[in-house]
Image: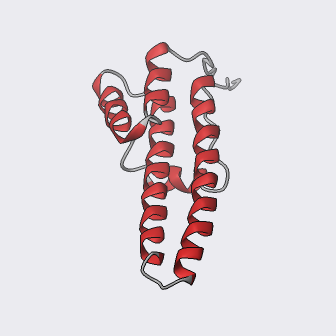
Amino acid sequence: MEQQTPQFNNTRSTEDKTVAIISYLTLIGWIVGLIMHNGTNKTKLGAFHLRQSLGIIILLFAIFILSFMFAFVPFFGFLILSLLSTLLYIGAFVIWLIALIGAINGDMKPMPVVGEMFQKWFAGFIQD
């Protein structure tokens, strides 16, 4: 008996891409994307990008908290705050931009450095 490998359709529906793209546009966009994803049909692309964008939102919040903590350290704290938070925000912006471009193209490629972790951490929260 010959085994057949399943064929996947690489074309993405408009609603599927819409959920993926909207999820990267602010926290409200993420909430709207989550509602759309849970509404009619759950898709792998939508779930993938919802997990990635949730990770970015949490990452940005963590950078904000870290920056806020350094703000109370005299003199050197301000220097560290300025340098470190600027570099972290630039890095987060680059990661966000890469993820948004992937959503626009309909790709399911994880973000550099943190993308795989976000997929594992939020797999139970946002399901396909």
61 over 82 or under it: above or below = above
**Residue 64 in picture, x, y percent from top left:** 44, 62
- Comparing 98 with 41, the one in front is 98
- Comparing 83 with 75, the one in front is 75
Tell me if I can see residue 34 in this picture. yes
Q: How many marks?
A: 0
- Place residue 105 in its image quadrant: top right
* Residue ID at (44%, 39%): 50
* Residue ID at (62%, 67%): 83
**Residue 41 in picture, x, y percent from top left:** 36, 23
User: Position of 68 compared to 39: left or right?
Assistant: right
Coloration of the structure image: secondary structure
**Residue 2 in picture, x, y percent from top left:** 71, 23
* Residue ID at (47%, 70%): 66
User: Position of 24 compared to 37: left or right?
Assistant: right
* Residue extending furthest toward the right: 2
**What is the quadrant of the C terminus in the image?**
top left
**Residue 125 in picture, x, y percent from top left:** 36, 48
